[in-house]
Image (cartoon, rainbow, N blue to C red):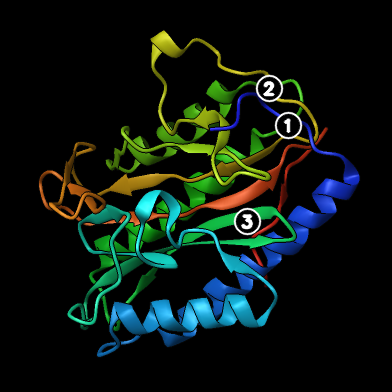
Amino acid sequence: MAERITIKSQTQLDKMRVAGRLVGETLNLLEKLVEPGITTYELNHEAEAFIRKNGGIPSFLNYNGYPASICTSVNEQVVHGIPSKKVKLKDGDIISIDCGAIVDGWHGDAARTFSVGSIAPEVQKLIDVTRECFFLGAEQAVEGNHLVDIARAVETHAKEHGFGVIREMVGHGIGTHMHEPPEVPNYVDIRMGRGTRLTEGMTLAIEPMISLGTWRLVFADDGWTASTADGSMSAHYENTIIVGKKSAEVLTLVQ
C-alpha cells in the first residue's frame, strides 16, 4: 500500500483515464471470447497480448508473485482464480474476470462476471444485482460523503435480493499503485465508523463481490484462489472511478 490517500491533479486524472479505457476495452474483448470450450489460459493470453499491443503493461502479472495477467474465477470462485490450460469453460458456467493495466505509470482496474452459454435465471439475477450494486455504490462517491455511504448502498441492495456480501475482500484506492488507501468495503460494520471523507479527485476501485449464499471464503492451496465456503455461485463487478463534486466518473466502462 502507498502511505496516504492522494488527490490527483487533472493531468494525473487524464493519465488514469487512458489506463482505465484500456482495461475497459480489454474486458470488452474478453466478453466476446467467453464461450463454451475456451480455456482460461487462452483468455489470459488474449488479454495480455491486447494490453501490450495498446501500450500497456498487465499490472497483475508478477504482482506479489501472481503468475498471470488476469484473474479468472469460475462459478463459486470469488476472486484471484489463476488461468489454466486445464480449466475449460462449459455451458452454464459463469466467469469473473479481473483485469488491470498500467499506462505511463498509472493504473486501471476493473472486473466483470460473464455468463457462459445458458445460465440459470437466479444466476443471471446474481450477475445483474452485482452490477447494480456497483452503480448504487458509485452514486455515493461524491465529495462530502464517506466510505460508509458506498458500503451501505452496496450491502443494502444485495441483501434486499437475499444475496451474501463478501467481507474478506474489499475495494481500494488506486493511482500509481494498484492498491492504495483507502480500503473500500462493501458492507457496513459499526467498528468502521463513517470511514474516510470523500474529496473530489480521489480515485477508487469500487468492487462488489456478491454470492448466492454465504459471504465466507475458503482459500485454495495455490495461495490465491478464494471461493465461497458453501460452494455457491459468486459474481464480481468492479470499475475504477474518480470522486466528483456531484457525480463520480467511471474510467473503465467503455461502451
Q: Amino acid at mark 3?
A: Gly
Which residue is the extreme one toward the right?
A: 10
Residue 7, horizontal then vertical, whole percent? 78, 31
Which residue is located at x 60 percent, y 31 percent?
Answer: 2
Asked whether the beta carbons under mark 2 and mark 3 sit within 8 Å of each other, the answer is no
Q: Which mark identifies residue 145?
A: 2
**Residue at disc 1, secondary structure:** loop
Q: Amino acid at mark 2?
A: Asn
Quadrant in the rendering for residue 170: top left
The residue under label 3 is: 108
Asked whether the beta carbons under mark 1 and mark 2 sit within 8 Å of each other, the answer is yes
**Residue at disc 3, secondary structure:** strand
Q: Nearer the viewer, residue 163 or 16?
A: 16
Q: Marks 2 and 3, how far apart in space? A: 23 Å
| Mark 1 Cα shell of 10 Å, populated few (<14), some (14-19), many (≥20) | many
Which residue is the extreme one toward the bottom?
A: 37
Q: Amino acid at mark 1?
A: Val
Q: Nearer the viewer, residue 169 or 236?
A: 169
The residue under label 1 is: 142
**Residue at disc 2, secondary structure:** loop
| Mark 2 Cα shell of 10 Å, populated few (<14), some (14-19), many (≥20) | some
